[in-house]
Every structure is written in structure tokens, then in C-alpha cells.
Image (tube, helix red, strand yellow):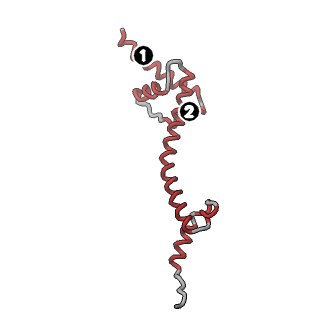
Amino acid sequence: MTRVRRGYIARRRRTKIRLFESSFRGAHSRLTRTIAQQKIRALVSAHRDRDRQKRDFRRLWITRINAVIRENGVYYNYSKFIHDLYKRQSLLNRKILAQIAILNRNCLYMISNEIIKKEDWKESPEMI
């Protein structure tokens, strides 16, 4: 029986898989089966880490805000600050607050002092 030459479809499928492998090392960039396996693994990691990245950035922003707020007041911390912001219905989110904390600490001190004054003012008539 004569040898059958395969058509272009299988070759086209393999070259499409090979377009993905430019950054892989070793057999992961040379062998078709391992390229396919590595591609699946890379896509799974990318999907998982997109959610993880959101979590990590939120944790970073919270840490930065908390560090700056604690420097300002002895008994004032991140959770009280955010609670007071929500009571004031402020539109500043954590990302913006973290940028303010890094670039201009005095501005964040002013915001927190303003919130503390308003909260103290609201609480004082109730006690009397």
C-alpha cells in the first residue's frame, strides 16, 4: 500500500497551536502534544490569576490606607475611617484613597480630620 500524504488541515491546526508557544522553554516549545498541554495550563493560570490580582490589589490599597491613617491618629484605624466615609456617603473608593495616601499624605490627613470632626460634632449633642 502506498503512503498517504496528509492534507493541510492537520498541519494548519498544529501551526495554530504553535503560535501560542513562543515564550515556553524546552519541549514545551517544540513538541506539539506538550505545547497543547502547556497552553491549557497557561490559560487556566491566567484565568485564576485575574481574580487573584483583583484581591491582591485590594489588599495592597487597604494596607496603604491603614498605614497612613494610623500615623495620623492614635485610636483611629482603617475600619473606622471607611465606616465614617460610608456614613458621610463619600464617593472615594479604596484605589483613589491609596493613591492619595502615597502621593499626598496631607490631603488624606485633611480628609480623615474632617470626617473625625463631623463625627465628633454629631455625637456630642446626643451625650448632653
Q: Is any part of residue 13 visible from this angle?
A: yes
Residue type marked 2: Ile
Residue type marked 1: Trp
Badge 1 marks a residue whose secondary structure is helix
Seen in the picture, residue 123 relative to 111 is either above or below; the reply is above
Q: Earlier in the sequence, mark 1 or mark 2?
A: 2
Residue marked by disc 1: 121
Extreme residue toward the right, this view: 26
The residue under the point 51% across, 49% down is 49
Q: Is residue 108 left or right of residue 79?
A: right
Contact, mark 1 vs mark 2 (Cβ under 8 Å): no
> 10 Å neighbourhood of mark 1: few (<14), some, or many (≥20)?
few
Q: Position of residue 32 (x, y in %)?
A: 56, 69
Residue in the foreground of this view, choosing between 6 and 125: 6
Residue in the foreground of this view, choosing between 49 and 127: 49
- Quadrant where the C terminus sits is top left
The residue under the point 53% across, 79% down is 8
Q: Position of residue 88 (x, y in %)?
A: 41, 27
Extreme residue toward the bottom, this view: 1
Q: Position of residue 55 (x, y in %)?
A: 49, 41
Q: Is any part of residue 107 visible from this angle?
A: no
Residue in the foreground of this view, choosing between 90 and 38: 38
Residue marked by disc 2: 100
